[in-house]
Amino acid sequence: MAAELRGPREAQPVVVCLHGLSANRATWRPVVERLAHRRRFLLVDSLGRGESDSSPRARYDLDSEVGRLLLVLDSMDVARPLLAGHSHGAAIAVAAARRAHALGLLLVNPVTPDLPRPVALTALRSPAVQALISPAVRLFRRPLTRYMLVRRVFADRRAIPAGVVARYADPWGDPGRAARLPAILSDWTPSELDQWDGPPGVPVHVIAGAQDRRIHPDSARRWADRLGATFELVAGCGHSAPEERTAEVAASLDNLLREISKETGRDKDDQERPVDSTSGL
Protein backbone atom coordinates (compact mmCIF):
# COMPACT_ATOMS: atom_id res chain seq x y z
CA MET A 1 0.00 0.00 0.00
CA ALA A 2 1.22 3.48 -0.86
CA ALA A 3 1.27 6.20 1.78
CA GLU A 4 2.43 9.81 1.72
CA LEU A 5 3.50 11.81 4.78
CA ARG A 6 3.29 15.58 4.68
CA GLY A 7 3.90 18.32 7.23
CA PRO A 8 6.09 18.94 10.30
CA ARG A 9 7.22 15.77 12.02
CA GLU A 10 6.38 17.09 15.48
CA ALA A 11 2.80 18.16 14.68
CA GLN A 12 0.22 16.05 16.51
CA PRO A 13 -2.19 14.45 16.04
CA VAL A 14 -1.47 13.07 12.58
CA VAL A 15 -4.44 13.51 10.24
CA VAL A 16 -5.01 10.26 8.32
CA CYS A 17 -6.79 10.99 5.01
CA LEU A 18 -8.97 8.25 3.51
CA HIS A 19 -10.48 8.42 0.03
CA GLY A 20 -13.63 7.10 -1.65
CA LEU A 21 -14.36 3.64 -3.02
CA SER A 22 -12.76 3.93 -6.49
CA ALA A 23 -10.76 7.14 -5.92
CA ASN A 24 -7.28 7.66 -4.47
CA ARG A 25 -5.42 9.95 -2.11
CA ALA A 26 -5.41 12.82 -4.62
CA THR A 27 -8.88 13.71 -3.28
CA TRP A 28 -7.31 15.16 -0.14
CA ARG A 29 -4.29 16.93 -1.64
CA PRO A 30 -6.01 20.35 -2.05
CA VAL A 31 -6.87 20.38 1.67
CA VAL A 32 -3.43 19.12 2.68
CA GLU A 33 -1.69 21.80 0.61
CA ARG A 34 -3.48 24.49 2.63
CA LEU A 35 -2.50 23.12 6.03
CA ALA A 36 0.72 21.11 5.64
CA HIS A 37 2.91 24.04 6.73
CA ARG A 38 1.74 23.37 10.32
CA ARG A 39 -0.24 20.13 10.37
CA ARG A 40 0.93 16.55 9.86
CA PHE A 41 -0.87 14.33 7.32
CA LEU A 42 -0.77 10.72 6.24
CA LEU A 43 -2.50 10.16 2.89
CA VAL A 44 -3.21 6.51 2.10
CA ASP A 45 -4.11 4.74 -1.14
CA SER A 46 -6.38 1.81 -0.30
CA LEU A 47 -5.33 -1.58 -1.63
CA GLY A 48 -5.84 -1.85 -5.40
CA ARG A 49 -6.30 1.89 -5.85
CA GLY A 50 -4.05 4.83 -6.66
CA GLU A 51 -0.43 3.71 -6.41
CA SER A 52 -1.15 0.74 -4.16
CA ASP A 53 -0.68 -2.76 -5.51
CA SER A 54 -3.55 -5.04 -6.45
CA SER A 55 -4.09 -8.45 -4.86
CA PRO A 56 -6.03 -11.25 -6.54
CA ARG A 57 -7.03 -12.77 -3.18
CA ALA A 58 -7.96 -9.62 -1.25
CA ARG A 59 -11.41 -8.86 0.12
CA TYR A 60 -12.79 -5.33 0.20
CA ASP A 61 -15.50 -5.53 2.83
CA LEU A 62 -15.34 -2.88 5.52
CA ASP A 63 -13.62 -5.04 8.12
CA SER A 64 -10.87 -6.01 5.64
CA GLU A 65 -10.30 -2.37 4.68
CA VAL A 66 -10.03 -1.43 8.36
CA GLY A 67 -7.58 -4.24 9.06
CA ARG A 68 -5.26 -3.08 6.30
CA LEU A 69 -5.47 0.54 7.46
CA LEU A 70 -4.48 -0.46 10.99
CA LEU A 71 -1.43 -2.28 9.62
CA VAL A 72 -0.42 0.88 7.75
CA LEU A 73 -0.81 3.03 10.88
CA ASP A 74 1.27 0.58 12.88
CA SER A 75 4.03 0.38 10.27
CA MET A 76 4.14 4.19 10.00
CA ASP A 77 4.15 4.53 13.81
CA VAL A 78 0.99 6.66 13.78
CA ALA A 79 -0.80 6.54 17.13
CA ARG A 80 -4.05 8.26 18.15
CA PRO A 81 -4.71 9.98 14.82
CA LEU A 82 -7.52 12.16 13.59
CA LEU A 83 -9.27 10.18 10.85
CA ALA A 84 -10.53 12.25 7.92
CA GLY A 85 -12.60 10.25 5.45
CA HIS A 86 -14.32 11.15 2.20
CA SER A 87 -17.29 9.10 0.93
CA HIS A 88 -16.43 5.42 1.54
CA GLY A 89 -13.31 6.61 3.33
CA ALA A 90 -15.65 8.12 5.94
CA ALA A 91 -17.16 4.67 6.48
CA ILE A 92 -13.67 3.23 6.99
CA ALA A 93 -12.90 6.05 9.45
CA VAL A 94 -15.98 5.28 11.57
CA ALA A 95 -15.30 1.54 11.53
CA ALA A 96 -11.60 2.04 12.42
CA ALA A 97 -12.05 4.76 15.04
CA ARG A 98 -12.08 2.64 18.19
CA ARG A 99 -9.33 0.24 17.15
CA ALA A 100 -7.13 3.13 15.98
CA HIS A 101 -7.80 5.07 19.21
CA ALA A 102 -8.78 8.05 17.07
CA LEU A 103 -8.88 11.45 18.74
CA GLY A 104 -11.49 12.76 16.30
CA LEU A 105 -13.34 12.13 13.05
CA LEU A 106 -13.96 14.38 10.06
CA LEU A 107 -16.50 12.73 7.75
CA VAL A 108 -16.93 14.44 4.38
CA ASN A 109 -19.74 13.46 1.97
CA PRO A 110 -19.98 10.28 4.08
CA VAL A 111 -21.42 6.97 2.96
CA THR A 112 -24.22 6.15 5.40
CA PRO A 113 -25.66 2.79 6.50
CA ASP A 114 -29.05 3.56 4.92
CA LEU A 115 -27.54 4.16 1.47
CA PRO A 116 -29.10 1.68 -1.00
CA ARG A 117 -26.66 -0.71 -2.60
CA PRO A 118 -27.28 -1.00 -6.37
CA VAL A 119 -28.59 -4.46 -7.20
CA ALA A 120 -26.45 -4.49 -10.36
CA LEU A 121 -23.30 -4.77 -8.23
CA THR A 122 -24.21 -8.38 -7.46
CA ALA A 123 -23.52 -9.28 -11.10
CA LEU A 124 -19.91 -8.18 -10.66
CA ARG A 125 -19.23 -11.32 -8.65
CA SER A 126 -19.51 -13.37 -11.85
CA PRO A 127 -16.09 -14.32 -13.33
CA ALA A 128 -17.53 -13.89 -16.82
CA VAL A 129 -18.69 -10.35 -16.06
CA GLN A 130 -15.35 -9.52 -14.44
CA ALA A 131 -13.51 -10.74 -17.55
CA LEU A 132 -15.55 -8.33 -19.67
CA ILE A 133 -15.31 -5.34 -17.35
CA SER A 134 -11.54 -5.33 -16.81
CA PRO A 135 -10.51 -4.52 -20.43
CA ALA A 136 -13.42 -2.06 -20.75
CA VAL A 137 -12.23 -0.21 -17.65
CA ARG A 138 -8.70 0.06 -19.05
CA LEU A 139 -9.86 1.17 -22.51
CA PHE A 140 -12.55 3.67 -21.49
CA ARG A 141 -11.22 4.79 -18.12
CA ARG A 142 -10.95 8.49 -18.97
CA PRO A 143 -14.39 8.99 -20.61
CA LEU A 144 -16.03 6.92 -17.86
CA THR A 145 -14.30 8.94 -15.16
CA ARG A 146 -15.22 12.22 -16.83
CA TYR A 147 -18.85 11.10 -17.07
CA MET A 148 -18.97 10.24 -13.35
CA LEU A 149 -17.32 13.49 -12.30
CA VAL A 150 -19.67 15.58 -14.42
CA ARG A 151 -22.90 13.69 -13.79
CA ARG A 152 -22.49 12.33 -10.28
CA VAL A 153 -19.71 14.07 -8.39
CA PHE A 154 -19.18 17.79 -9.00
CA ALA A 155 -22.08 20.20 -8.52
CA ASP A 156 -20.64 22.48 -11.22
CA ARG A 157 -18.89 20.79 -14.14
CA ARG A 158 -16.96 24.01 -14.74
CA ALA A 159 -15.40 23.61 -11.30
CA ILE A 160 -13.64 20.34 -12.12
CA PRO A 161 -9.92 21.03 -11.55
CA ALA A 162 -7.51 20.64 -14.45
CA GLY A 163 -5.98 17.18 -14.55
CA VAL A 164 -8.44 15.61 -12.10
CA VAL A 165 -9.83 13.19 -14.72
CA ALA A 166 -6.36 11.80 -15.39
CA ARG A 167 -5.52 11.57 -11.67
CA TYR A 168 -8.54 9.39 -10.99
CA ALA A 169 -8.64 7.47 -14.29
CA ASP A 170 -5.03 6.62 -15.03
CA PRO A 171 -4.41 4.20 -12.11
CA TRP A 172 -7.08 1.97 -13.68
CA GLY A 173 -4.88 1.57 -16.74
CA ASP A 174 -2.88 -0.96 -14.74
CA PRO A 175 -4.14 -4.48 -15.65
CA GLY A 176 -4.00 -5.72 -12.06
CA ARG A 177 -6.00 -2.83 -10.65
CA ALA A 178 -8.54 -2.95 -13.48
CA ALA A 179 -9.05 -6.65 -12.84
CA ARG A 180 -9.77 -6.00 -9.17
CA LEU A 181 -12.25 -3.13 -9.62
CA PRO A 182 -15.27 -5.46 -9.98
CA ALA A 183 -14.35 -7.15 -6.68
CA ILE A 184 -13.93 -3.76 -4.96
CA LEU A 185 -17.37 -2.66 -6.16
CA SER A 186 -19.12 -5.97 -5.47
CA ASP A 187 -17.79 -6.13 -1.89
CA TRP A 188 -19.15 -2.64 -1.14
CA THR A 189 -22.09 -2.90 1.27
CA PRO A 190 -23.04 0.37 3.02
CA SER A 191 -25.30 -1.43 5.52
CA GLU A 192 -22.14 -2.89 7.10
CA LEU A 193 -21.86 0.43 8.90
CA ASP A 194 -24.74 -0.57 11.17
CA GLN A 195 -22.19 -2.62 13.13
CA TRP A 196 -20.26 0.47 14.23
CA ASP A 197 -20.90 3.64 16.19
CA GLY A 198 -18.55 6.53 16.75
CA PRO A 199 -16.16 6.24 19.71
CA PRO A 200 -17.61 7.86 22.85
CA GLY A 201 -16.19 11.18 23.97
CA VAL A 202 -14.49 11.85 20.63
CA PRO A 203 -15.44 14.91 18.54
CA VAL A 204 -17.01 14.04 15.18
CA HIS A 205 -17.81 16.56 12.46
CA VAL A 206 -19.83 15.72 9.33
CA ILE A 207 -19.72 17.81 6.14
CA ALA A 208 -22.36 17.34 3.44
CA GLY A 209 -22.74 18.98 0.04
CA ALA A 210 -26.07 20.68 -0.56
CA GLN A 211 -26.00 19.46 -4.19
CA ASP A 212 -24.57 16.01 -3.49
CA ARG A 213 -26.18 13.55 -5.95
CA ARG A 214 -24.48 10.52 -4.39
CA ILE A 215 -25.23 11.01 -0.67
CA HIS A 216 -28.38 13.00 0.04
CA PRO A 217 -27.78 15.70 2.69
CA ASP A 218 -30.69 14.40 4.77
CA SER A 219 -29.02 10.98 4.94
CA ALA A 220 -25.75 12.60 6.04
CA ARG A 221 -27.60 14.61 8.68
CA ARG A 222 -29.28 11.50 10.10
CA TRP A 223 -25.90 9.77 10.24
CA ALA A 224 -24.43 12.78 12.04
CA ASP A 225 -27.25 12.69 14.59
CA ARG A 226 -26.68 8.99 15.21
CA LEU A 227 -22.96 9.57 15.74
CA GLY A 228 -23.55 12.56 18.01
CA ALA A 229 -21.65 14.68 15.51
CA THR A 230 -21.80 18.32 14.55
CA PHE A 231 -23.16 18.85 11.05
CA GLU A 232 -22.21 21.30 8.30
CA LEU A 233 -24.08 21.75 5.01
CA VAL A 234 -21.97 23.41 2.30
CA ALA A 235 -23.85 25.30 -0.41
CA GLY A 236 -22.90 24.87 -4.06
CA CYS A 237 -21.12 21.60 -3.30
CA GLY A 238 -21.60 18.13 -4.73
CA HIS A 239 -19.90 14.89 -3.72
CA SER A 240 -16.29 16.08 -3.62
CA ALA A 241 -16.13 18.76 -0.95
CA PRO A 242 -12.33 18.47 -0.48
CA GLU A 243 -11.91 19.58 -4.13
CA GLU A 244 -15.03 21.73 -4.65
CA ARG A 245 -14.98 23.58 -1.34
CA THR A 246 -11.40 23.16 -0.20
CA ALA A 247 -11.34 26.26 2.01
CA GLU A 248 -14.41 25.20 3.98
CA VAL A 249 -13.14 21.64 4.52
CA ALA A 250 -9.68 22.90 5.54
CA ALA A 251 -11.23 25.35 8.01
CA SER A 252 -13.42 22.65 9.55
CA LEU A 253 -10.46 20.31 9.86
CA ASP A 254 -8.33 23.02 11.43
CA ASN A 255 -11.09 23.85 13.94
CA LEU A 256 -11.42 20.18 14.86
CA LEU A 257 -7.67 19.95 15.42
CA ARG A 258 -7.80 23.04 17.62
CA GLU A 259 -10.58 21.46 19.66
CA ILE A 260 -8.52 18.31 20.11
CA SER A 261 -5.44 20.36 21.04
CA LYS A 262 -7.39 22.13 23.80
CA GLU A 263 -8.68 18.83 25.17
CA THR A 264 -5.23 17.21 25.13
CA GLY A 265 -3.37 20.32 26.31
CA ARG A 266 -1.38 20.65 23.10
CA ASP A 267 -1.32 23.57 20.72
CA LYS A 268 0.93 23.07 17.71
CA ASP A 269 0.02 26.06 15.56
CA ASP A 270 3.59 27.31 15.37
CA GLN A 271 5.42 24.67 13.36
CA GLU A 272 8.48 24.40 11.19
CA ARG A 273 8.36 23.95 7.46
CA PRO A 274 6.87 20.67 6.22
CA VAL A 275 9.02 17.63 5.60
CA ASP A 276 7.52 15.55 2.75
CA SER A 277 8.07 11.88 2.19
CA THR A 278 6.42 9.03 0.36
CA SER A 279 6.84 5.36 1.13
CA GLY A 280 5.46 2.06 -0.12
CA LEU A 281 4.42 -0.37 2.59
Image: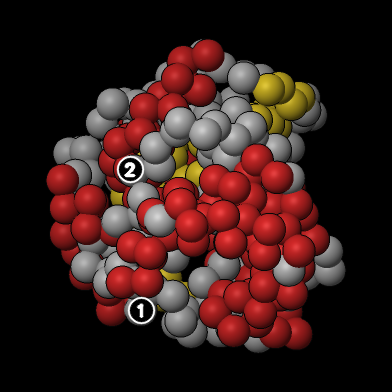
**Can residue 107 be seen in the rendering of this structure?**
no
Q: Which of 95/126 is in front?
A: 126
From what the image shows, is residue 121 above or below residue 281? below
Mark sitting earlier along the chain (1/2): 2
From what the image shows, is residue 263 above or below residue 237? above
**Residue 189 horizontal/vertical position (percent):** 30, 56
Q: Which mark is residue 216?
A: 1
From what the image shows, is residue 112 above or below residue 56? below
Q: Residue at x 44, y 33 (%)?
A: 58
Q: Residue at x 37, y 71 (%)?
A: 120
Q: Residue at x 56, y 17 (%)?
A: 76
Q: Is residue 205 left or right of residue 131?
A: left
Nearer the observer: mark 1 or 2; the answer is 2
Q: Is residue 119 left or right of residue 225?
A: right
Q: Is residue 150 left or right of residue 122?
A: right
Quarter occupied by the N terminus: top right
**Residue 16 horizontal/vertical position (percent):** 51, 36
| Quarter-of-image position of residue 236 | bottom right
Residue designated by label 2: 62
Name the residue furthest front: 128
Q: Which of 137/261 is in front?
A: 137
Q: Secondary structure at mark 1?
A: loop
Q: Which of 127/260 is in front?
A: 127
Amino acid, disc 1? His
Q: Is residue 86 left or right of residue 240?
A: left
